């Protein structure tokens, strides 16, 4: 039987995109070790600008990809996510056919 395009994409999530020998690395998310791909280059393309709240304070943005089956339920916008000990607020979260795209922000100085 020939696999469907969606089946091929799901296989690519495990075998390529979330493979720690290819794109991903192991990180701790909300106290749980899992394969994570961090893509700050995509944020540059999405934002094309720096945000500043006040003197000495800036917004740190991070875009991560995690497997839905490893992460659990899709996080709600406004919820808190802890990535490798740093606290972030979820500003956007999308389920891309078993792969979560989670946009995070945190105030930094």
Image: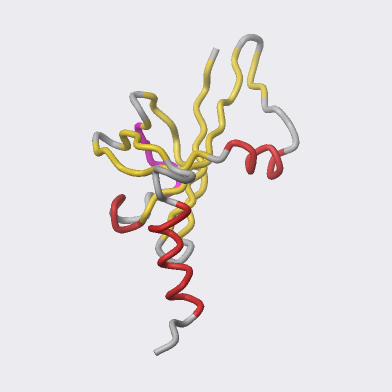
Front-lying residue, 22 or 78:
22
In what quadrant of the picture does the N terminus appear?
A: bottom left
19 to 51, vertically: above or below: below
Magenta stretch contains residue 74:
no
9 to 84, vertically: above or below: below
In what quadrant of the picture does the C terminus appear?
A: top right
Q: Is 82 on the left-hand or right-hand side of 97?
A: left
Residue 56 occupies quadrant: top right
Q: Is 66 on the left-hand or right-hand side of 43?
A: left
54 to 100, vertically: above or below: above
The residues colored magenta run 76-82
The location of residue 22, given as percent across then percent down, is: 47, 46
Residue 26 occupies quadrant: top left
Magenta stretch contains residue 81:
yes
Front-lying residue, 32 or 89:
32
The location of residue 45, given as percent across then percent down, is: 71, 43
The location of residue 7, given as percent across then percent down, is: 42, 75
């Amino acid at each position: 039987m020939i696999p469907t395009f969606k089946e091929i994409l799901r296989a690519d999530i495990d075998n390529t995109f979330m493979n720690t020998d290819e794109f991903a690395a192991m990180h701790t998310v909300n106290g749980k070790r899992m394969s994570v791909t961090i893509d700050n280059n995509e944020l540059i393309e999405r934002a094309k600008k720096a945000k500043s709240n006040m003197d000495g304070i800036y917004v740190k943005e991070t875009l991560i990809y995690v497997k839905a089956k490893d992460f659990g339920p899709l996080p709600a916008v406004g919820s808190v996510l802890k990535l490798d000990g740093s606290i972030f607020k979820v500003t956007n979260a999308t389920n891309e056919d078993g792969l979560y795209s989670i946009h995070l922000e945190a105030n930094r100085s």
